[in-house]
Image: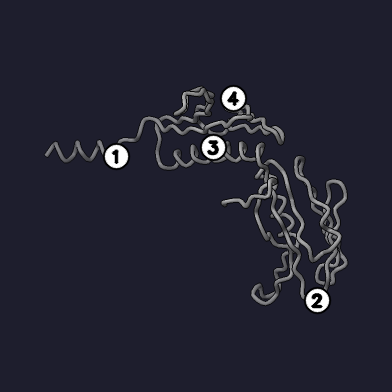
Amino acid sequence: MDKPIRKRVIEKMEKLVTRREVRIPEGVEATVNKRAVTVKGPLGQLEKDFKHALVTISLQSAKNASGEEMKKVVVEMWVECRKRKAVVMTIVSEIENMVIGVTRGYCFKMRACYAYFPMMIEAKEKVVSITSFIGRRERKTIELPSGCTIDNGLKDVKQPFCIAGTDLDKVSLTCAKINQSCKVRDKHKDKFLDGIYIEEKTHLDGIENEF
């Protein structure tokens, strides 16, 4: 009778440590101060603090298959369960997005769609203003966060415009604010399609993104 019980207890035992690595490519510098990670590359510098997570983040060096020395960021968490493992994977994804951001950048192309009332979109410095949406007189304004830029493709409303930056969170949040500012709630969404939508997700080097 003891064997099945012992086997059941061993199966329910939690894993002691979860370890994930992020390789740092050439031309990119990474520093770790406790749980604050800073990544510096050709397009700029990004810094994020993961002090809310009970993890250990360290910068280590190792050799690749060709014998060259390379650096990697190691994220570890002790006494792992399924929910804590998700936190580790989230931090690893954030660091990977930082590395891509400082090397290739992010560019989200958006397009304005309307059936009858042409809307006006203007960008001055760090503020995007939208007027004449479905014939309304109110002006909708969205402030661009630091590190995000908008191109000069706003001369023709029918042409797509690009929200670009190195921080994926800021770029996607800006696009979400622009999309939600033109959201109509009292119309049928299958018939009324006026608004501003994301058309394409690319990098600053023009290569289409995989996500």
Going from the N terminus, do you reach mark 2 or mark 1 first?
1
In the rendered structure, find residue 116 and report the number of the disc placed on it: 2
Image location of residue 58, percent across then percent down: 52, 24
Going from the N terminus, do you reach mark 4 or mark 1 first?
1
Q: Answer whether labels 3 and 2 touch (C-beta < 8 Å).
A: no
Which amino acid does the dot numbered 2 rest on?
A: Tyr
Q: Answer whether labels 4 and 1 touch (C-beta < 8 Å).
A: no
The one of 207 and 108 positioned closer to us in this rendering: 207
Which amino acid does the dot numbered 1 rest on?
A: Lys
Q: Residues within 10 Å of mark 2 (few under 14, many from 20)?
A: few
SS for callout 4? strand
* Residue labelled with disc 4: 32
- Judge depth for marks 2 and 1 and give the one in front: 2
In the rendered structure, find residue 12 and report the number of the disc placed on it: 1
Residue 198 falls in which quadrant of the image?
bottom right
Q: Is residue 36 above or below residue 209?
A: above
* Residue labelled with disc 3: 91
SS for callout 2? loop
Is 139 positioned to the left or the right of 170 in the image? Answer: right
Going from the N terminus, do you reach mark 3 or mark 2 first?
3
SS for callout 3? helix
Residue found 74% across the figure and 70% down from its top: 194
